[in-house]
Image (cartoon, grey):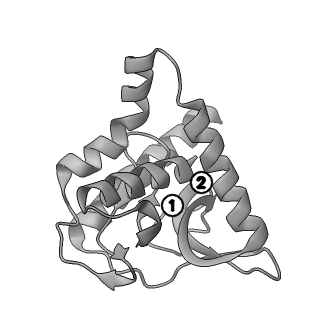
Amino acid sequence: MTRLDQNRATNQFATKHGVGAKEVSRVIIWGNHSSTQFPDISNALIRGQSVKFDGHDDAFIQLIQKRGAAVIAARKLSSAMSAAKAAADHMHDWWNGTSEWVSMGVISDGTKYNAPEGVIYSFPVTVDSATKQWKIVDSVPLDDIAKQRLKVTGDELVEERTEAL
């Protein structure tokens, strides 16, 4: 459900910048669907244009990482409608294809962004409309802080896999 996290991050980012969510692109969720996920806004665009902002805004990152738990604590219910919308968005993009970057949990072969091999890891992907095949976006620039965040969430996925098996 990293599309749920992407939708949350996109909406929060749009609100912060006074634009509609449809005007924002390239917001990425890396890693696990957990509190270690990395909501990456360092490559985000508004109306297709780069904007200067702090890609390591800890308050923003923590807001997205903890949003699911906050909704459950406040409502005593899960955010089922938001999750359903995210599932529909995910399937729409997978079925129809998209050249936009979307977050998708896919099996890691260990060759992209130092994500561990053999875990389901959220990457930015595009989807070919003819073949319905997703492709991990190559060469997303990552600084050392971002690389460390990707490692933390990857390590958690390895721990979860080890516990499960």
Residue 86, above or below 50: above
Amino acid type for the residue under numbered disc 2: Val
Residue 69, above or below 159: above
Residue 16, how many percent across, how many down? 24, 56
Residue 41, how many percent across, how many down? 32, 66
Say the numbered circle drawn on residue 116.
1
Assign a secondary structure to mark 2. loop
Dividing the picture into quarters, in which one does residue 89 lie?
Answer: bottom right
Q: Is residue 83 left or right of residue 130?
A: left
Residue 28, how many percent across, how many down? 43, 64
Residue in front for this viewpoint, 111 or 142: 142
Question: Are discs 2 and 1 less than 8 Å apart at CB?
Answer: yes
According to the picture, the residue beneath numbered tag 2 turns out to be 119
Amino acid type for the residue under numbered disc 1: Pro
| Residue located at (48% from left, 64% from top) | 115
Residue in front for this viewpoint, 36 or 115: 36
What quarter of the picture does the C terminus occupy? top right
Residue 93, how many percent across, how many down? 68, 66
Dividing the picture into quarters, in which one does residue 108 lie?
Answer: bottom right
